[in-house]
């Protein structure tokens, strides 16, 4: 139901007329994602402060207006800025983009919802800081705060971001303002340093939830290592994969590798990050995705997976020991292993012209991606963003915006044990489903700890081709269902899969009670991670 003119006028008085949007053309942009959506947005509101958020929520309760908060709207593949339920207004927090605090000595930074990864990287560079924020593979203009609240992850130290956030400030659906952890205690010197405070860890209620709007949080930063090395390897068989995974897991258990400093991608995903889809002369696709593998360059012939590892050394001796241990652990278990350090990078850079000629690759570009500008050192990258144009015909745009340009993308995010057999099994499931839909099966894996991995399944298509869009949605739904059935539980959901999960009924009941307690009028992001499709008539 559209908000009344009275409600809109009152909201304009709070945030200013320029920050209340009802223009159909702009609303249509907010309603667009990287897959088909039917939700309609009657109003977009852009508050500029916590006080304005509180007053907007008070009006939302009075007028029974549901609001769906978004920070930067870069949740590509999972819904972008589109609400879960039809008829929700959008509360766009991008105007709140201040870096509120920073400490070089204590290694932390405090941000508002609109602060981006690129903004933090630029700020730290301007400060000549020796710290960095682990970067995501997604767009540089993504929100740091929103990524943390979605339990997103970055590459390298402290990459499991939700584990390294402190001192959240949140506004409850009723408009009340709360602080979490030790920051809830007046005068605490560790409010921005300690992960937990006294009593129950209530901050956990605000991650992947619709129980509050988080307006600030402190993120802990990693210190730049004196000696960084990046390793890359390839494997050609499941037997190699299983052996290599066991060796890498053991290195992490021994402390040689850190959490989230290892990633693995299958050959289809590697291709999408390096090139565009090879349409024939008439713009038609290949008869089968498997024919892509027949066109691989010689250096990748037969390769099924590629792995990347960041090594962080405190001294030259430490770095040499890491390199020796890695090479010894992977000897005979991988097809090829390359380790790049400052010396080899400098030599390759000086010899870039002949090396580029011999290898038929841009050596300088490769060095930047894997070493000098490595995501393992907190450098934001546009690589994954532009990969969404894999199946989009025509030249790449200057600025990446798959929502605007009709690119198609679905993400599936699941957890699996840190074991090569499980990597092989999840890959096989995705391959079977994707190939049956004539789409490329793309898988990526990240080590969240020595115990488990996250898998990110990428389904790329052209949203403007109806049969591709239908096939992609069917592929997403079937792959997700099969992965869940096999025991690989989702760790993040898009708006297209909020109803695909069937949690334990006692868990559902607890969430329902919390929602009814903290949001009695159901005005904050209804349907988001609350599993209301399982509430049932007796629970409502």
Image (cartoon, rainbow, N blue to C red):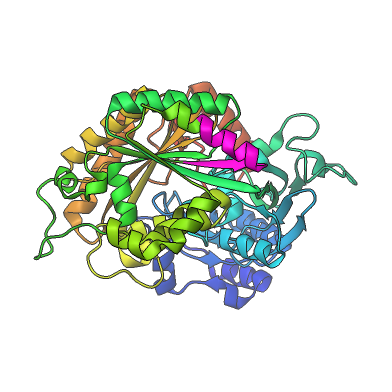
Q: Is residue 37 visible?
A: no
Q: Position of residue 499 (x, y in %)?
A: 40, 37
Rendered-image quadrant of the N terminus: bottom left
Question: Is residue 511 magenta-colored?
Answer: no
> What residue lies at 59% left-to-right and 73% top-to-bottom?
19
> What residue lies at 65% left-to-right and 64% top-to-bottom?
125
Along the line of sight, which residue is nearer the eye, 178 or 339? 339
Q: Is residue 433 visible?
A: yes
Residue 203 lies in what quarter of the image? top right
Q: Position of residue 133 (x, y in %)?
A: 62, 52
**Residue found at the far right of this picture:** 187
Position of residue 406 in the picture relative to residue 91 (left or right): left
Vertical relation: 327 (above or below) 469: above
> What residue lies at 9% left-to-right and 65% top-to-bottom?
282
Provide the residue span drawn in magenta: 309-325
Q: Position of residue 104 (x, y in %)?
A: 77, 54
Q: Position of residue 80 (x, y in %)?
A: 44, 56
Along the line of sight, which residue is nearer the eye, 328 or 460? 328
Position of residue 30 in the picture relative to residue 523 (left or right): left
Residue 488 lies in what quarter of the image? top left
Position of residue 430 in the picture relative to residue 465 (left or right): right
Vertical relation: 161 (above or below) 513: below
């Amino acid at each position: 139901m559209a908000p009344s003119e009275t409600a809109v006028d009152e909201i304009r008085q709070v945030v200013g007329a320029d920050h209340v949007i009802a223009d159909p053309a702009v609303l249509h942009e907010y309603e667009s994602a990287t897959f088909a959506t039917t939700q309609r947005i009657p109003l977009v509101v852009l508050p500029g402060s916590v006080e304005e958020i509180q007053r907007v929520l008070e009006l939302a309760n009075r007028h029974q207006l549901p609001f769906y908060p978004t920070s930067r709207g870069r949740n590509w593949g999972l819904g972008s800025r589109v609400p879960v339920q039809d008829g929700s207004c959008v509360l766009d927090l991008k105007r709140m983009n201040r870096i509120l605090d920073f400490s070089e000595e204590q290694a932390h930074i405090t941000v508002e919802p609109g602060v981006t990864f690129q903004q933090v990287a630029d700020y730290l560079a301007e400060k000549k800081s020796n710290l960095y924020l682990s970067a995501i593979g997604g767009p540089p203009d993504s929100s740091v705060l929103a990524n943390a609240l979605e339990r997103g992850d970055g590459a390298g130290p402290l990459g499991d971001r939700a584990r390294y956030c402190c001192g959240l400030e949140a506004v409850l659906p009723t408009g009340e303002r709360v602080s979490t952890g030790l920051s809830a205690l007046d005068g605490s010197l560790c409010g921005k340093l300690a992960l937990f405070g006294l009593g129950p860890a209530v901050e956990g209620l605000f991650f992947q939830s619709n129980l509050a709007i988080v307006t600030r949080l402190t993120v802990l930063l990693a210190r730049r290592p004196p000696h960084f090395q990046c390793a890359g390897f390839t494997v050609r068989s499941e037997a190699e994969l299983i052996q290599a995974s066991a060796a890498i897991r053991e290195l992490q258990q021994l402390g040689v590798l850190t959490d989230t400093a290892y990633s693995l991608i299958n050959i289809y995903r590697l291709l999408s990050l390096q090139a565009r889809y090879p349409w024939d002369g008439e713009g038609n696709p290949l008869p089968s995705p498997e024919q892509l593998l027949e066109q691989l360059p010689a250096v990748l012939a037969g390769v099924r997976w590629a792995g990347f590892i960041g090594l962080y050394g405190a001294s030259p001796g430490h770095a040499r020991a890491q390199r020796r241990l890695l090479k010894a652990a992977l000897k005979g278990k991988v097809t090829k292993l390359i380790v790049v350090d400052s010396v080899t990078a400098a030599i390759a850079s000086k010899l870039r012209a002949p090396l580029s000629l011999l290898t038929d690759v841009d050596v300088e570009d490769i060095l930047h991606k894997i070493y000098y500008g490595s995501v393992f050192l907190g450098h934001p990258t546009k690589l994954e963003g532009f990969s969404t144009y894999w199946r989009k015909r025509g030249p790449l745009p200057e600025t990446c915006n798959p929502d605007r340009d009709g690119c198609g993308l679905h993400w599936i995010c699941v957890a699996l044990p840190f074991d090569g057999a499980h990597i092989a099994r999840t890959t096989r499931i995705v391959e079977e489903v994707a190939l049956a839909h004539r789409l490329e099966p793309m898988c990526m894996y990240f080590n969240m700890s020595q115990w488990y991995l996250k898998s990110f399944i990428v389904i790329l298509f052209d949203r403007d081709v109806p049969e591709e869009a239908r096939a992609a949605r069917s592929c997403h739904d079937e792959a997700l269902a099969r992965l869940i059935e096999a025991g690989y539980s989702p760790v993040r959901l898009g708006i297209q899969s909020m109803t695909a999960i069937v949690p334990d009924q006692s868990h559902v009941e607890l969430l329902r009670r919390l929602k009814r307690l903290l949001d009695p009028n159901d005005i904050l992001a209804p349907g988001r991670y609350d599993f209301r499709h399982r509430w049932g008539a007796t629970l409502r």
